[in-house]
Image (cartoon, rainbow, N blue to C red):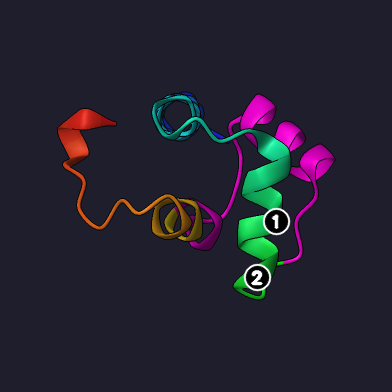
Amino acid sequence: MTGKEKEWGVRASRFIKAELKRANVGYKELAERLNKHGLRETETSITGKLGRGAFAASFFLACLAVLGRNEIRVEDI
């Protein structure tokens, strides 16, 4: 992974963490919400993904959807 790819991963991870905090949702609840939408996630898997800052765009988008974020601006990430 290049330096820029890592940078974007960290930014995306921080954005999801901030959105979780804003929504008062923890990793366990996020996993439950994602599972209801057909994604197989656990609290541990989410902790790892957000800690590494490496995850698929589908995970990022699904997180936004279950948190009720229908619109974001790239400059906010």
Q: Answer with left or right where residue 55 lies relative to residue 13.
A: right
Residue 46 in percent (x, y) is at: 71, 41
Q: Are marks 2 and 1 in contact (CB under 8 Å)?
A: yes
Residue 6 in percent (x, y) is at: 51, 28
What type is the residue that disc 1 sits on? Glu
Disc 2 target residue: 36
Instruction: Identify which residue is drawn at 50% across, 27% down.
Output: 17
Q: Residues within 10 Å of mark 2 (few under 14, many from 20)?
A: few
- Mark 2 to mark 1 CA distance (whole Å): 6 Å
Q: Was residue 59 drawn as part of the magenta stretch in this picture?
A: yes
Q: Main secondary structure of the magenta part?
A: helix
Q: Answer with left or right where residue 59 lies relative to residue 36.
A: left
Q: What is the span of residues highlighted in magenta in the rendered image? A: 40-60
Instruction: Identify which residue is drawn at 49% across, 60% down.
Output: 62
The image quadrant that residue 59 belongs to is: bottom right
Compared to 76, does 28 lie above or below?
below
Disc 1 target residue: 32
Q: Secondary structure at mark 2?
A: helix
The image quadrant that residue 65 belongs to is: bottom left
Compared to 45, does 56 lie above or below?
below
Which image quadrant: the N terminus? Answer: top right
Q: Between residues 59 and 27, which one lies in front from this camera angle?
A: 27
Q: Between residues 9 and 20, which one lies in front from this camera angle?
A: 20
Residue 19 — which label?
none
Q: Secondary structure at mark 1?
A: helix
Which image quadrant: the C terminus? Answer: top left
Identify the residue at the far bottom of this view: 38
Residue 30 in percent (x, y) is at: 62, 47
Q: Answer with left or right where residue 75 lies relative to residue 41.
A: left
